[in-house]
Amino acid sequence: MKPISRFYFNICLVLLSLIGNAQEVSETKKDSIPLKKERYGFRLGVDLFKFSRSFYEKDYRGLELVGDYRLTRRHYLAAEIGNENKTVDDDQLNFTSKGTYLKVGFDYNSYENWLNMENIISIGLRYGVSSFSQTLNSFQVYNPNPYFGEEPIEIDGTQYDGLTAQWIEVVAGMKAEVFKNVFVGFSLRLNRLVTQKRPNNFDNLYIPGFNRTYNGDFGVGFNYTVSYFIPLYKATVKSKEKKENDKKKK
Amino acid sequence: MKRILALLLITICFSSCEKDDICAEETTPRLIIEFYDISNPSNLKNVLNLKVKGEGATDFIVFNESLPIDNPNRYLFGGNKLELPLKINDSITKYSLILNSTSTTNANEDFLQFNYTPQNVFVSRACGYKTIFTLNAAPDGIIKTDAIVPDNFWILEYSILTTNITTENETHIKILF
């Protein structure tokens, strides 16, 4: 698994470089150094976590495409679009949730690259919308006093259509270039529901894109992406940033 | 960087509590019956050695869980507030109530049949669904019959206080004896 080991090597590099940050600043920035140019463009990719889960988890099918566009030196416009179909088998309930979602927002790259590296350690925000349906496959009535015997599992099959949800996501992520223009990365997400359309006599227990709901309005997410960078143009690093670096030196 | 690490930690914490949900809400209620004194209808009155068995159940209702299984006193009830489970997948539950069940001469059996409509209501992820009941309007909600060998009624009067059986926090039926 050469790409994977490279990826970890890159991560180690990234982490090591953080320790050595101070040295880096003091060594650079002489006027004779040619102007630093950075590439701008689109990055498109796929979430391998959802993709692989579709194979090893029989109750899950999902696909997520990710993309971002470099707006400024540190800001990226980012989006994810995906589709999920998940069957949850809880103690009292068995239901299937399926639908499509879109998340749009931005990432802020807080990592200072050296030379012409383009790695990213980012924090960002997304606004997510999901349109989905839930099917209650079966349930068992909760009866704390089963005097007449245990309650049978009732096959239901009611489908609750036209459900929607909107939420805000905080994203912490990392991307590293493993080959030329090929990036591998992962992100962790904390989600908070803003609004949702609840089914009658049921609840939104799993929302595609948002995942399982905790306490009714809280969720977590993860993705592991492989993406390809399409460079569009190059821009020199602005002098404003140099000034900022000069300030940091003092 | 510290912020990102903090976020990572929080996320890991939350991802590990997948199965911690425990059903804590009130779910399927039982029918709550209170016994009153016929000579003084505003006073609660304790029944004596009442044994209760539902039609279709394998055994009498256990009221004294702490007693060993072979002790017949497990099934005796001596209070004034009786809780009876209703059948969830049926619209009829019939109970046999035997007063003075330990006495060979004084035991008196009456039957109460409850007619109702069950309804499944969603509670939460952990609890799933509960069943609530609506008793049929009088006189159909409760039907009182005597033992096969008639021994007169010990239940002299009864009344439905509410037909909506949704919680155990209120009394649904009042019995005078």
Image (spheres, coloured by chain):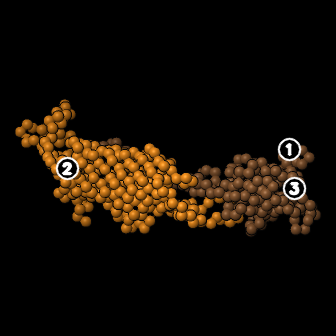
Chain colours: A orange, B brown
Mark 2, residue position = A41
Which one is nearer the viewer's eye here, B158 or B85? B158
Q: Earlier in the sequence, mark 3 or mark 1?
A: 1
Q: Residue at x 15, y 38 (%)?
A: A238
* Residue at screen point 23% across, 43% down: A71
Are tags 3 and 1 found on a single chain? yes
**Residue A17 as seen in the image, left or right of residue B27:** left
Q: In the rendered view, would you say B58 is above or below A247?
A: below
Mark 3 Cα shell of 10 Å, populated few (<14), some (14-19), many (≥20): many
Determine whether the residue tagged by mark 3 lies in a helix, strand or loop: loop
- From the viewer's perspective, tell me whether residue A229 is left or right of residue B31: left
Q: CA distance from mark 3 to mark 1?
A: 16 Å
Q: CA distance from mark 2 to mark 3?
A: 85 Å
Quadrant placement of the N terminus of chain B:
top left
Residue shown at 35%/64% (left/top)?
Answer: A52
Residue placed under numbered mark 1 in the picture: B43
* Residues tagged 3 and 1 counted as in contact (Cβ below 8 A): no
Q: Amino acid at mark 3?
A: Ile
Q: Residue furthest right?
A: B105
Q: Position of residue A196 (x, y in %)?
A: 47, 48
Q: Position of residue A241 (x, y in %)?
A: 18, 36
Residue B146 is at least partly visible in this image: yes
The image quadrant that residue B43 belongs to is top right
- Type of amino acid at the residue the image marks with label 2: Gly
Chain of the residue that carries numbered disc 3 in the rendered image: B
Q: Residue at x 16, y 50 (%)?
A: A232
Q: On screen, B172 above or below A47?
A: above
User: Do the residues indicated by labels 2 and 3 lie within the same chain of the protein?
Assistant: no
Residue A206 vs B40, above or below: the answer is below
Question: Picture coordinates of residue A77 (x, y %)?
Answer: 27, 46
Query: Which quarter of the figure has residue B143?
Result: bottom right
Q: Which residue is mark 3?
A: B155
